[in-house]
Image: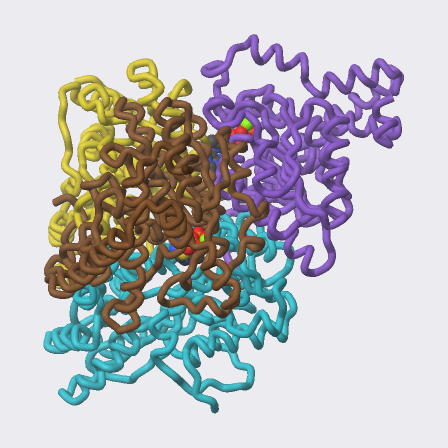
Chain colours: A cyan, B yellow, C purple, D brown
Amino acid sequence: MPVISYIDAITEAMREEMGRDKRVFVLGEDVGVRGGVFRATNGLIELYGEDRVLDTPLTESAIVGVGVGAAAYGLRPIAEIQFADFIMPAINQIISEASKMRYRSNGTWECPMVIRAPYGGGIHGALYHSQSVEALFTGVPGLKIVAPSTPYDVKGLLLSSIRDNDPVLFFEHKKLYRFIKDEVPETEYTIPIGKADVKREGSDVTVITYGLMVHYTLEAAKKLAEEGVDVHVLDLRTLIPLDKGAVLEATKKTGKVLIVHEDNKTSGFGAEVAAVIAEEAFFDLDAPVGRLCSPDVPSMPYNSKLEKAFMLNPEKIAVAIRELAEL
Amino acid sequence: MPVISYIDAITEAMREEMGRDKRVFVLGEDVGVRGGVFRATNGLIELYGEDRVLDTPLTESAIVGVGVGAAAYGLRPIAEIQFADFIMPAINQIISEASKMRYRSNGTWECPMVIRAPYGGGIHGALYHSQSVEALFTGVPGLKIVAPSTPYDVKGLLLSSIRDNDPVLFFEHKKLYRFIKDEVPETEYTIPIGKADVKREGSDVTVITYGLMVHYTLEAAKKLAEEGVDVHVLDLRTLIPLDKGAVLEATKKTGKVLIVHEDNKTSGFGAEVAAVIAEEAFFDLDAPVGRLCSPDVPSMPYNSKLEKAFMLNPEKIAVAIRELAEL
Amino acid sequence: MRHEQLGLTNEQVLEMYRYMLLSRKVDEKMWLLNRAGKIPFVVSCQGQEATQVGTAYALDREKDWLCPYYRDLAMVLLFGQTAKDQMLSAFAKEGDPNSGGRQMPNHFGDRRFRILSGSSPVTTQVLHAAGVAYAGKITGENPVVLTSCGEGSSNQGDWHEALNFAGVHKLPVVFLVENNLYAISVPLNKQLAGENVAARGQGYGMPGIRVDGNDVFEVYEVMKQAVERARKGEGPTLIEAVSYRLTPHSSDDDDLAYRTREEVEEAKQKDGLFVLEKYIDEHELWTDEIKEAMKQEIDTEITEAIKFAEAAPHPDPADLSKHVFAR
Amino acid sequence: MRHEQLGLTNEQVLEMYRYMLLSRKVDEKMWLLNRAGKIPFVVSCQGQEATQVGTAYALDREKDWLCPYYRDLAMVLLFGQTAKDQMLSAFAKEGDPNSGGRQMPNHFGDRRFRILSGSSPVTTQVLHAAGVAYAGKITGENPVVLTSCGEGSSNQGDWHEALNFAGVHKLPVVFLVENNLYAISVPLNKQLAGENVAARGQGYGMPGIRVDGNDVFEVYEVMKQAVERARKGEGPTLIEAVSYRLTPHSSDDDDLAYRTREEVEEAKQKDGLFVLEKYIDEHELWTDEIKEAMKQEIDTEITEAIKFAEAAPHPDPADLSKHVFAR
Ligand SMILES: Cc1ncc(C[n+]2csc(CCOP(=O)(O)OP(=O)(O)O)c2C)c(N)n1
Ligand SMILES: Cc1ncc(C[n+]2csc(CCOP(=O)(O)OP(=O)(O)O)c2C)c(N)n1
Ligand SMILES: [Mg+2]
Ligand SMILES: [Mg+2]
């Protein structure tokens, strides 16, 4: 199997699905000739032309709103938001329109659309090119929310998202784009939306996480294994619908849960995961449900020392796991 | 003390503070001659003129964005969003601008501004005049979020919000506007942001809630008292900053916690409250942390039977408390 | 005669009138039902029927699409909806083709007639229209898309983004702004910098045309040209039709708080329905019998629609959670 | 001579040139520092200095306000910031007056000079400008507010809402659009329906004027009139200054992916800095000594600024959580 990067897996998924399904088209800022500022749509305009690889004006509400209209018509738009931080002007179209189209029309209209957005930090992006914005949407019924951590997962989940009949927010951690490579089949495969994945089996402490933090946690786990702490790592992959079964099972596995995410703590998605555990797996718990997250500040600063102070890393994660293991 | 309605308490707070502080001004749709579609700004234009009671064009992003500029200049805008559901077009200005002004400028600029928004349902408002939108903002550091339940609280907290040097989202439950009356002092008083309030002392089950649900819970508690179940009711009043001390104390009080809110369950603010309890009061708990919320559907329908099926009420709350009490 | 110069037959003129009258009467009945406590909410088309009929008449009602707003009753009736549909919606019954009773009345959406489901937050549909037209263009089916909104709504950011997008891609969209001089209580001079919406067309590289919205022939004529232009691939047109809202903003409004009875009475003299009736009378396009029969027919149609809708079943409360997602 | 007709002294022309050159040189140095791996990011003013200097020169730099965008280096230098300030920001040091190293370079904000802190999401500042002007107007202090953005950004909804708001209230704002023909990779014809931003002025009831942004005198002349108009209470003006971005979009961009080397070379021939230098040469407004001395001075200034900034302290990581709220 070829070994490719996270971003190449994304490009492949779009390229292949656009070849298979004429209804699929891509729109966003600089997605055409430039192939996207991160190069996720690299080569697509040459293959599929500028009608299906559409450079839009610099207008996020239009990118999503035009997508909603095109999806209603019967196409399958993939909208790229250049940085997740810039999804804000499109929130009205996402929350008032895309998420409610099916419900408000009593199932007669729908919005099969993917909104891709690179999120996350640790790349000197400062306050407005580093944000984790997923928690803005996890409370909005009608949206599916996906945030994969590996090239294999990102390709399989992007294909499922494009084929899904509902709006999917597809969050790609931009630090992962070129950070990791993976074996990815050239043959068609999909990964179902709504299924978490155990990335490491362990018996002492369960970590539930997603995105870049999966890798940092696995690093921490490797180190802790040497100390005799055996860490179980669940990668949510999909945030909404949350794979409750997997969360509860992972909790049962060790009785000690640490939720880790890059987003700030208060009302981050970890809150929902913790709440589900506190409600539905209470009697399986041997210790308080921990959350290790970024601090509650507006976003990570540009200065490298401040950025480092903001970001989680394998060391910080290891400390928190160790503490929990010792309880 | 005069007995006045929730909405009159809001009007009074603005009227008095505009009299005391020339920097305060009101802007929004129909807030002038019409006195607001709910009449919250009734009489203000007559007293303070159209420069300080400004009918804006139908543009929420401008209402907040102009407010941000005016606040930076040194004024104290109170922006009215006609219905909380229509705050979506302003989210970029709230999240990217208002919440980050102080942080990004290293404390040299600020945004002392109140954004008032009537939220909540049960008033035949259908999908777009009924939403609870608070959870969209509780994860955004830099914003304070207030959601009072009584005329006394709403007046005291609105005064504090106007005087606060940071942006405050002030959520008013529109069903409460004329639903309840209360003794409200004519003399100046404030209630600090960030302090929850025990609305009923009890020893069997703790309910943590806010907004309209405070009243429904108190009704349920009254009924349950007759059955011998003694309910402790904590009204959060402020969501951010969360009064953790009060939450933990209320948890300790009974060891059994039910969180109740009108917003849908998944990633509602109850998730954060449950997560705090699961992390910081775990050993005080005698039972799983319950959450009783609206169902995870996009919003409540217009049809009265569907609306009723959506909304919580004292009966549904009583059932959930009873279940918890019996655990 | 004017209508002949426009290529309209006598029968067509009578049909135009019929739809204007039907709309007016359905609307009037809704107010009565509301005042009688039978339906919770009304928002009217009264005073704007000439604009709406002139518009819909210029479109291909077998092929073209509508992204209308809440006052466009006459438009959707011409596209195929019936008085019965309106009453099912007003009573929020299961059979409501727009939303199965989930949305407020006048939140149109009907797959049968290519009327895309709309929401309450104003102006979002204007972007959907661009999306539908874009999809129609790249699939080669090329329907013309008519989208409309109030003049107040034309100040929203989405409106700008939509006109610009459609202008860039020369999409077959006609942007109609129904200027009724008020956005709820806010008069033109506080809404619009230029008093004139049509003047904005130039900035988007498209014709901007202002017409007398009370003159169904003038609207039809200009609309016809715009539709032809769109059909030929020459791009979008902006049309501002000026008329007046003869009712309060909605059943929750009290318009005498912001405009005088005299002003409303004066506007009634120019009412497009009245103007067309006079035209038909003067040119003797009908006999008294035909006229009477038409009125009778409409009355019967509405009476039966109300009877049917009142007796029709409510949606099943168990269906509250249906149609959040596809499956 | 042209500058005399505009009331500019020889000294002023030299000062204009000095600031254009200073900006250019600071900018060029940043690229070198970036390529040397010393600073992570650069976004340039190169090619737009004439526009910016002509603009700032027409304002009252002791009283007026700026809500600029990320290319406006020359503007903020004229308002009082220094090369040292820029380097502190580029190195993200504690002493950076804009943000204490929290924001990327060119995210200007400086209370000392009434430069309102800006963010990365484009066009939000245009609404802030309207808010500052509104506040200045109702307090009677009436500063003129200059706000700017790129032509791509002028398609955002906030831009529309801001121009309309300012138009309605005849606010003393000058809206500058620096049209450099590209929004990252997207050329004008894919961004703008009309090729011409100035044409939009009419739709907001304000003059819309297009100038050669390479001609500092033309910009100054038109700007002067707009500022006078604003100062006299006659309302806002829209000015579109056309020039060219001589560098890639930012240090992360590769502009040859979307434009030819020849095109860039051709634009360099029209470079406003070059044009002004020729004008000064031709009219012998300086001697070779003065010219050389100026260049020398600037070089020294920048070299020292870099030395200072490199040696300056980083912000204290412990301050990460400072300035989220007032206390
Ligand atoms: C985004 C948004 N903000 C506010 C409202 C509340 N609202 C409903 S209609 C209306 C006025 C609309 O005025 P206009 O666009 O002129 O249309 P008209 O009702 O006059 O036909 C307002 C403020 C809304 N529906 N959506
Ligand atoms: C809301 C938002 N979307 C996207 C971006 C990413 N972005 C930064 S600059 C830019 C292009 C800006 O073009 P233009 O307005 O013409 O200004 P220029 O850079 O050409 O001066 C884009 C897309 C952003 N900063 N903000
Ligand atoms: Mg109107
Ligand atoms: Mg540009």
Measured from the top left, where is residue B67 in percent x and y? 31, 35
Measured from the top left, where is residue A318 in percent x and y? 17, 77
Residue at 68% over, 47% down:
C235
Residue at 18% over, 45% down:
B108
For the residue pair D25 and A131, the one nearer the viewer reads as D25
D142 lies left or right of A184 = left
Residue found at the far top of this picture: C262
Q: Is residue B22 above or below residue A28?
A: above
For the residue pair A83 and D222, the one nearer the viewer reads as D222
Residue at 59% over, 27% down:
C179
Q: Is residue C148 above or below residue A6?
A: above
Measured from the top left, where is residue D163 in percent x and y? 44, 35
C264 lies left or right of B195 = right
Measured from the top left, where is residue D242 in percent x and y? 48, 48
A225 lies left or right of A15 = left
Residue found at the far bottom of this picture: A1
Residue at 24% over, 30% down:
B75
Q: Is residue C163 above or below residue A109?
A: above
Evaluate whether residue C33 shows in this view. Answer: yes
How many callouts does the rendering have? 0
Pick the quarter of the image with the C terminus of chain A.
bottom left
Q: Quadrant of residue B285?
A: bottom left
Evaluate whether residue B235 shows in this view. Answer: no
A100 lies left or right of A323 = right
Q: Quadrant of residue D88?
A: bottom left
Q: Is residue B267 above or below residue C26?
A: below
